[in-house]
Image: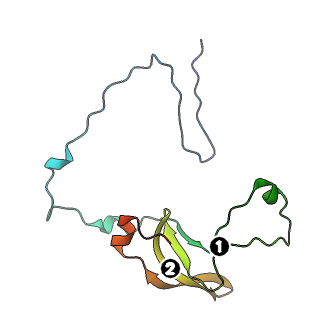
Amino acid sequence: MAERDDTMTSGEEQSTVRPPETPVREARFVDLRDQPIGEDRQSIDFLRDVEVELTAELGSTRMRIKHILGLRPGSVVELDRLAGEPVELTINKTLIARGEVVVVDEKFAVRITEIVSPEKRLGGNGSR
């Protein structure tokens, strides 16, 4: 019986299916509870150059597939937000701020009107 390697491609998460007789061993991890905290703690400055995706959500709606299939150029899709209502800025689906839509050099932009507090973000209460 030939071994099978089902690896996903084109930007998807990679997953490999291996036969049941593949040798495995127990994972061993360092106990982080014994690590010093405080002055020896590394600064988060090394993260400043990490790029993340920021999303501005104008609104959303739920539609049946039959209505989505009927969309054509010129179709109008109503969203759940009122005109002038703040848009939400998220990073990795976590709400970080709200703001108003503006235009800068012919491109849409968002003027920040509210920063969501860390307590609300970390407590999960930062959403609408």
Find residue 46 and name its label.
Answer: none
In this rendering, the count of numbered labels is: 2
Find residue 80 and name its label.
Answer: 1
- Dot 2: within a 10 Å radius of its alpha carbon, few (fewer than 14), some, or many (20 or more) residues? many
- Dot 1: within a 10 Å radius of its alpha carbon, few (fewer than 14), some, or many (20 or more) residues? few
Q: Is residue 5 above or below residue 81?
A: above
Q: Is residue 15 above or below residue 58?
A: above
Q: Position of residue 95 (x, y in %)?
A: 47, 70
Is residue 95 or residue 16 the one in the foreground? 95
| Amino acid type, residue under disc 1 in the picture | Asp
Relative side of 77 to 43, left or right: right
Q: Earlier in the sequence, mark 2 or mark 1?
A: 1
| Amino acid type, residue under disc 2 in the picture | Arg
Distance Cα–Cα, label 2 vs label 1: 16 Å
Q: Is residue 42 above or below residue 59?
A: above
**SS type, badge 2:** strand
The image quarter containing residue 6 is top right
- Which residue in the protein does label 2 denote? 98
Q: Position of residue 58 (x, y in %)?
A: 62, 75
The structure residue drawn at horizontal position 83% and vertical position 70%, both measured from the top left corner, is: 75
Q: Nearer the viewer, mark 2 or mark 1?
A: 1
The image quarter containing residue 61 is bottom right
Q: Position of residue 88 (x, y in %)?
A: 53, 75
Relative side of 26 to 11, left or right: left
The structure residue drawn at horizontal position 52% and vertical position 65%, both measured from the top left corner, is: 53
Q: Position of residue 43 (x, y in %)?
A: 25, 66
The image quarter containing residue 62 is bottom right
